[in-house]
Amino acid sequence: MAKESLNTSRQLAEVDPIIHAPARLGIISTLFVVEVADFAFLTRQTGLTRGNLSAHLKKLEEAGYITVEKKFVKRVPRTLLSLTKQGREAFHIYRKQMQQALDELAGS
């Protein structure tokens, strides 16, 4: 049983820390489902402040996981966000790693 727990700990240590942060996991999960979202929608969905959301979006953009498109709609600025192919793949890998770790825990 201790060996299985050790394997699970190693698996969890290998998950992507960019995605694993709770706020960024919420952002990525939302974008995975809706495909494109504007900044206001993500603020409401995640419950993050505008500044906090901006900081997390910057990290996700720097990692190549999201694209940020700024445009004007009837003279009002609008920021649209979506997952990149790399972001989608990273999320699939993250989900697989977490599922394996949780399955091992349940089996021990």
Image (spheres, grey):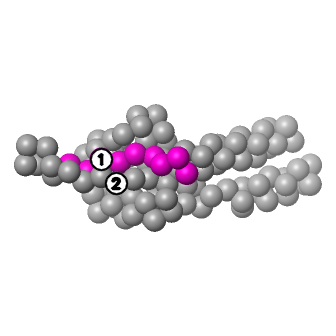
Residue at left 24%, top 54%? 70
Residue 106 magenta: no
Residue 80, which numbered label? 1
Question: Which label's residue is closer to the chain start, 2 or 1?
Answer: 2
> Does residue 44 show up?
no
- Say what secondary structure mark 2 lies in: strand
Q: Amino acid under label 1?
A: Leu
* Residue 84, position as x, y percentages in the image: 48, 49
Give the left or right position of residue 50, taking residue 34 as reference.
Answer: left
> Which residue is labeled 2 in the image?
68
* Residue 38, position as x, y percentages in the image: 28, 44
Give the left or right position of residue 22, taking residue 7 as reference.
Answer: left
Residue 82 magenta: yes
Q: Which residues are magenta?
A: 78-86
Residue 26, which numbered label? none
Q: Amino acid under label 2?
A: Val
Q: Dot 2: few (<14), some (14–19), or many (≥20) neighbours within 10 Å?
A: some
Location of residue 41 (image quadrant) = top left
**Image quarter hosting the C terminus:** top right
Q: Main secondary structure of the magenta part?
A: strand
Location of residue 44 (image quadrant) = top left
> Does residue 68 show up?
yes
- Say what secondary structure mark 1 lies in: strand
Instruction: Tell which of 74 and 49 is nearer to you.
Output: 74
Residue at left 79%, top 59%? 10
Residue at left 60%, top 46%? 89
